[in-house]
Amino acid sequence: MSGYLLSRSIQTVLTLLVMSVLVFVGLYLVGNPVDVLLSSTATPTERLQVIQSFGLDKPMWEQYWLFLTRALSGDLGNSFVFNQPALTLILKRMPATLELALVALVLGLVFGIPLGVYAGLKPKSLISKSVMTFSILGFSLPTFWIGLVMVMLFSVQLGWLPASGRGETVPVFGVPISLFTLDGLSHLLLPALNLALFKISLIIRLTRAGVLETMQLDFVRFARAKGLPESRIVTVHVLKNTLIPLITVIGLELGSLIAFAVVTETIFAWPGMGKLIIDAIAVLDRPLILAYLMITVVMFSVINLLVDILYSIVDPRVRLEGNS
């Protein structure tokens, strides 16, 4: 296990290094942030002062080297727009994004697994066919379009739920959480459901395929021959073996929920990291963009590591060993 953890740590460091180079070079080539931040009436002297204050007068390799050396000490630079540490800005927005992603994942599991199990046990029933049709729509319809429809229907037409914002929050160990207040929950429901629709469809189809495959295996037939109740066969034998491959997918999907919640946060004005990065991209705020991507890579790596460890616990046949 220790060798495996060391191997994964080295992989994470190398991934961060490669990502930082690619993103930094890409941002450097896209354009000059000063052209976005300053008005057209700025004098050459003012422009030069801003360029020097941001360190943009240095060559690209020197700018990257400064970023890398500061990052090793935990300093990811100051935001050009907010004039605050980029890491601090992202950490302030992170609880909102994590809450949204976790609630969306829970919705995906709560709805996806039972519907997928039912569709696998009774594939020819009308309900199963309706569930599979819904899953196809969940894959096909764009997230931004579904979000706009939700806002028009539930907020504008019916007036049931708010269309934007996070609502009232309560501090839990110093972290603001909106899930534990009625107002916060009403603000959370629409964006979480919008973010979860694709995951619900994915989990339905994966669970159904796993159930259909497992039901044909010999140990299920042997359990029936022993006279075990169908409910026990499904919950103990079928569902357990179906969930093993789902664990990896669910872990990866949690990472994607965190990283790609940008569209949902923009539509519903959810004050998370996704909304922040969209604002940063609009003004080419390099330190903020770099800090966001570095943190996202770290979160992806940690989630994947936890998934691998959990997979080895659930399936004893899997052993985690470091590469020689």
Image: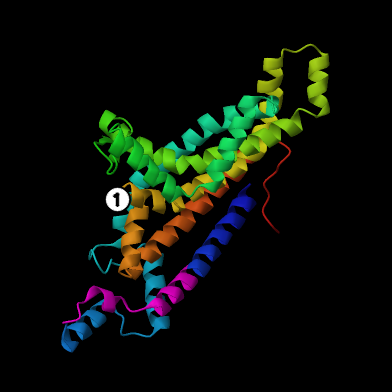
Q: Say what secondary structure mark 1 lies in.
A: helix
Question: Residue placed at 65% from the left, 29% from the top?
Answer: 119
- Depth check, front residue: 95 or 65: 95
The residue tagged 1 is: 92
- Magenta highlight on residue 34: yes
Question: Residue placed at 70% from the left, 35% from the top?
Answer: 210
Horizontal side, residue 116 vs residue 111: left or right: right
The answer to which quarter of the image holds residue 62 is bottom left
Quick one: quadrant of the C terminus?
Answer: bottom right
Q: Can residue 61 be seen in this view?
A: yes
The image shows residue 78, relative to residue 31, as above or below, that is: above
Question: Residue placed at 43% from the left, 48% from the top?
Answer: 145
Q: Which residue lies furthest to the front in this view?
A: 157
Q: Is residue 76 visible?
A: no
The amino acid at mark 1 is Lys
The image shows residue 281, relative to residue 198, as above or below, that is: below
Question: Residue placed at 54% from the left, 63% from the top?
Answer: 15
Position in image of residue 186 (x %, y %): 31, 33
The way the protein has been coloured in the rendering is: rainbow
Query: Which is the main secondary structure of the residues drawn in magenta?
Result: helix
- Depth check, front residue: 20 or 258: 258
Position in image of residue 163 (x %, y %): 29, 41
Position in image of residue 267 (x %, y %): 35, 50
The answer to which quarter of the image holds residue 74 is bottom left
The image shows residue 17, relative to residue 87, as above or below, that is: below
- Magenta highlight on residue 43: no
Looking at the image, how many numbered discs can be counted on the residues? 1
Position in image of residue 31 (x %, y %): 36, 78
Q: Bounds of the magenta span?
A: 20-41
Horizontal side, residue 105 vs residue 155: left or right: right
The answer to which quarter of the image holds residue 274 is bottom left
